[in-house]
Image (spheres, grey):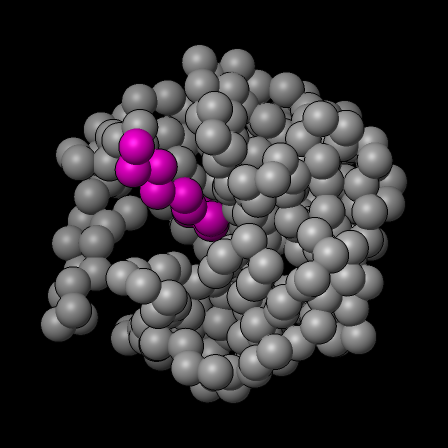
Amino acid sequence: MGFVQDNGSYTPLATDAALVSSIGMYLDDSRNRLLVAVSDPGYNQQRTSAATLRKLARLVILNRDNGQLIRSVDLGSLSSAPNHFANDVAVDTQGNAYITDSFAPVIYKVDAQGVASIFLENAQLGAPAGAFGLNGIVFHPDGYLLVAKSNEGALFKIPLSNPAGLTRVTTSQNLRAADGLLLQNNTTLQVVTNAQAKVYRLTTTDGWATATTSGTFTTQPQYPTTLARRAGADSYVLYSNLNALQANQQPPVAQFSIVKVTF
């Protein structure tokens, strides 16, 4: 884990052994925390193991300022699914964290005291073996989660008070390979689609029962995965080059880009 400055320099923040492969992150400024979804796809040869390969789902909570480990929470053992991949994190107003599992039809919850539970387990959220299902997740201040499902190109709305009452957001936009999400405001959502190399801006007029496309940003074909926001409405997309890693490209990619999204 680390910081990227405007000049492109990278400064490490944390190298704790609990960070096998850091996938999604949430910066919880008000609580001075950095929450990290951790998995083991096998890319980190120094930390992968037979016990964790494609089975690890973990939430690591770090001090935002110095990177010290606050808590490491095991998630995968909560579910009987054979494989796990903690992917992304959202946090509600009470400090509860919600974590997606791409290899199991599960969303986990970790409360502010570090107690973990299954928030929702639903076969509708599953994916074929080896495919990525649940992916990006954001908390909406009206009391629900918006969650991307990569293999279907679907977006789900999940009420915090009744997770079993989840609904699929109706949209004509093809969201195949949906990855990271960014809630720009209550009625605007940005969606990264990694294999499409696009960022779509969706808007709603009915509380995310339906959504229409109000903008498209085409990225470089470098497997964009996630978004972050700076001042105002500016958002930035990360070019992960994960496809090159998966293909064992040689020499490996040595330089990565973070690019301002312009619709």
The x, y position of residue 109, in whole percent, is: 59, 26
In the image, residue 29 lies in the stretch drawn in magenta: yes
Whether residue 145 is visible to the viewer of this picture, yes or no, is yes
- x then y, percent, for residue 24: 47, 48
User: What residue is drawn where x is 50% and y is 57%?
Assistant: 185
Direction from residue 202 to residue 105 in the image, left or right? right
Task: Answer with left or right where residue 164 lies relative to residue 69.
Answer: right
Query: Which of 242 and 70 lies nearest the eye of the viewer?
Result: 70
Asked if residue 28 lies left or right of residue 203, the reply is left
> What x and y, as percent, mark residue 98?
57, 34
> Magenta segment range?
20-30
Q: Position of residue 36 (x, y in %)?
A: 42, 39
Q: Residue at x 47, y 24 (%)?
A: 94
Q: In the figure, residue 100 lies in which quadrant?
A: top right
* Residue ID at (54%, 40%): 141
* Residue 58 colored in magenta in the image: no
| Residue 51 found in image quarter | top right
Compare residues 59 and 173 and report the one nearer the observer: 173
Q: Which residue lies most toward the front here? A: 205
**Residue 73 seen in render:** no
* Dominant SS in magenta: strand
Above or below — where is 198 with respect to 102? below
Q: Is residue 168 above or below residue 221?
A: above
Q: How many marks?
A: 0
Q: Residue at x 29, y 47 (%)?
A: 1
Return the residue found at the far right: 123
Q: Nearer the viewer, residue 253 or 183?
A: 183
